[in-house]
């Protein structure tokens, strides 16, 4: 668990780990120099929660690495301090690693909002499993509170979470792991991911496009012929970068910039044409804004 000023939801998150039916666990709690009461909350638990604190606040990727360095277990799971696990999560996922080829295990989960709205991540279709590197480039579908990884899997990488990333550090790590290891899936809802405007993902949304460009540059360094062999997937990532640009403008109410970005590509995809048209209609603009978050 990595935490920076997470007191609002922290106790609920920690309690969801203590409620696990699988008992052979410990929490590595890394406090990223919080200034609220996160430390008091974390220290109120027993020795199964090992508390560590950084001297200063560092990027999330770097802070996650600090926590990883303290892990003693054979498997590593992730829970941010505003998310939740269902009691059977670890019990259902750990057996998947009996297959020596599995490096990552995920499960279904619910996105939930402060207004009470909820939606299931995988609705009618199960996510791809096995060797999923190309699948994840096509459409990334891993949510961090659902993940358990084999600690051994990290040893094949020259670095873990990239400290240069503050928004896509998990995306970068799990895709790199999927290049070498297989992914497995439990078709049960075992985690809840909280979506709210106080999250780093929302506050710093504009950085997504920059970090995604850096990610593509990284891939060509460790994957031979990356731009040639994965051209279809790269095109989809470039479209995603464009989507981030549009979303950033939309969420800040800059609809003129939205239209400027979309105008050259209006007829390449129906969604661009629809968004361009909706950008002129105040009621529909507000409705679409809710869908973006």
Image (cartoon, rainbow, N blue to C red):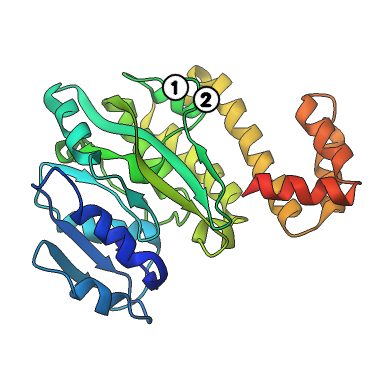
- Residue lying farthest to the front in this orientation: 116
Asked if marks 1 and 2 touch (Cβ < 8 Å), the reply is: yes
Between 215 and 191, which is closer to the camera in this rendering? 191
Q: Position of residue 13 (x, y in %)?
A: 32, 59
Alpha carbon distance from label 1 to label 2: 6 Å
Residue 63 in view in this figure: no
Give me the residue at 19% from left, 75% from top: 43
Question: Which residue corresponds to mark 1?
Answer: 134
Task: Name which residue lies at 25% across and 59% down.
Answer: 15
Q: Place residue 182 in its image quadrant.
A: top left
The residue nearer to you, when weighing 90 against 51, is 90
- In the visual, does 289 lie left or right of 58? right
Q: Secondary structure at mark 1?
A: helix
Dividing the picture into quadrants, the one containing residue 251 is bottom right
The picture places residue 31, in percent across and down from the top left corner, at 28, 70
Question: Disc number at residue 150?
Answer: none
In the rendered image, which residue does mark 2 sit on?
138
């Amino acid at each position: 668990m990595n935490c920076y000023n997470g007191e609002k939801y922290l106790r609920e998150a920690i309690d969801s780990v203590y409620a696990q039916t699988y008992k052979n666990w410990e929490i590595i709690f890394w406090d990223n120099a919080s200034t609220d009461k996160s430390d008091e909350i974390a220290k109120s638990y027993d020795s199964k929660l090992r508390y560590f604190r950084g001297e200063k606040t560092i990027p999330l990727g770097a802070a996650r690495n600090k926590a990883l360095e303290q892990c003693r277990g054979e498997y590593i799971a992730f829970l941010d301090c505003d998310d939740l696990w269902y009691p059977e999560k670890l019990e259902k996922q750990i057996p998947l690693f009996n297959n020596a080829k599995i490096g990552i295990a995920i499960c279904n989960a619910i996105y939930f909002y402060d207004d009470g709205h909820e939606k299931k991540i995988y609705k009618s279709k199960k996510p791809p499993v096995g060797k999923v590197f190309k699948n994840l480039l096509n459409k990334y579908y891993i949510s961090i509170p659902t993940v358990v990884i084999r600690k051994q899997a990290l040893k094949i990488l020259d670095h873990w979470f990239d400290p240069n990333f503050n928004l896509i550090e998990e995306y970068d790590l799990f895709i790199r792991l999927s290049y070498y290891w297989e992914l497995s899936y439990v078709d049960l809802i075992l985690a809840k991911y909280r979506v709210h405007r106080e999250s780093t993902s929302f506050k710093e949304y504009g950085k997504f496009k920059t970090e995604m460009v850096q990610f593509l540059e990284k891939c060509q360094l460790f994957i031979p012929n990356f731009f040639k062999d994965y051209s279809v997937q790269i095109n989809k990532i470039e479209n995603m970068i464009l989507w981030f640009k549009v979303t950033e403008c939309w969420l800040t109410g800059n609809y003129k910039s939205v239209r400027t970005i979309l105008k050259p590509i209006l007829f390449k995809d129906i969604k661009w044409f629809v968004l361009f048209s909706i950008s002129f209609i105040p009621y529909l603009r507000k409705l679409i804004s809710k869908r973006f978050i």
